[in-house]
């Protein structure tokens, strides 16, 4: 990374034009980073991914995909994929899902998901170890405006899930998923707690017993 890039503030929102944002992320192609653009500000997340963050990431993806499969809900999950409204908004959530009739909305080879052409995901999930307050605040507003139907924040530190149903650019707390009816946040939180004590295969077997 060049000296100029190294001096660029990270893990915080800074004022930038769309062109400045595009230039910044182009310079980060060889770096493991997530990027966001919202209301004339950009955020580059360069913090290394912790063991707990990575583990919870896998548990949540497995749980959602397993639940959808067992309940016959069509689902396409995406891992750290870029969703973009050119010149306006850009985001790379940890996890996103298109469900039911939208499960095959995005064609193979699409690259960056163009939200001027395709709908926003039904479910977006952020895994928060160091970015919890931002995930609950600014990013939640971003996903509200994008038209995401449901948004979860996984609090890695406390093995907790803060979930929101979104509509009309607003959101409300929920304890059970509305896009995946019957999936309670308490079950997912229990799976996260169990993953601190046992391996993921055993957590998966427990989830299977709960979902069947």
Image (cartoon, rainbow, N blue to C red):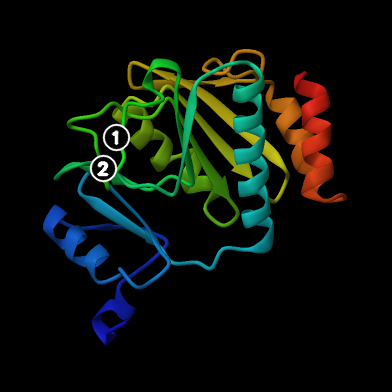
Q: Nearer the viewer, residue 147 or 106?
A: 106
* Residue at image location 75% in from the left, 42% down from the top: 192
Q: CA distance from mark 2 to mark 1?
A: 6 Å
Density class for disc 1 (Cα within 10 Å; few <14, some 14-19, many ≥20) is few
Q: Residue at x 84, y 43 (%)?
A: 202
| Residue at numbered disc 1 | 107
Q: Which sits in the foreground, 17 or 93?
A: 93
Label 2: which residue? Answer: 110
Give the mark count. Answer: 2
**In the image: residue 126, left or right of residue 4:** right
Q: Quadrant of the N terminus?
A: bottom left
Find numbered disc 1 in the image and state the secondary structure of the residue it sits on: loop
User: Which quarter of the figure is the C terminus placed in?
Assistant: top right
Q: Which residue of the protein is positioned furthest toward the bottom in this rendering?
A: 3
Disc 2 and disc 1 in contact, CB within 8 angstroms? yes
User: Relative to residue 159, is residue 5 drawn left or right?
Assistant: left
């Amino acid at each position: 990374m060049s000296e100029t890039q190294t001096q660029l503030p990270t893990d915080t929102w800074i004022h930038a034009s769309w062109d400045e944002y595009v230039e910044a992320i182009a310079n980060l192609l060889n770096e493991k980073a997530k990027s966001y653009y919202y209301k004339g500000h950009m955020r580059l997340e360069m913090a290394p991914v912790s063991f707990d963050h990575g583990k919870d990431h896998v548990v949540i993806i497995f749980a959602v995909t397993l639940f959808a499969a067992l309940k016959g809900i069509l689902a396409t999950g995406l891992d750290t994929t870029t969703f973009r409204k050119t010149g306006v908004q850009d985001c790379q959530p940890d996890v996103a899902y298109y469900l039911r009739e939208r499960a095959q909305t995005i064609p193979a080879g699409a690259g960056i998901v163009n939200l001027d052409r395709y709908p926003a995901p039904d479910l977006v999930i952020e895994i928060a170890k160091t970015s919890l307050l931002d995930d609950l605040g600014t990013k939640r507003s971003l996903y509200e405006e994008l038209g995401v139907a449901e948004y979860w924040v996984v609090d890695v530190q406390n093995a907790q899930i803060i979930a929101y149903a979104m509509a009309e650019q607003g959101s409300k707390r929920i304890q059970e998923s509305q896009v995946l009816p019957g999936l309670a946040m308490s079950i997912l939180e229990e799976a996260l707690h169990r993953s601190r004590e046992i391996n993921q295969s055993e957590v998966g077997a427990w989830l299977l017993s709960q979902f069947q």
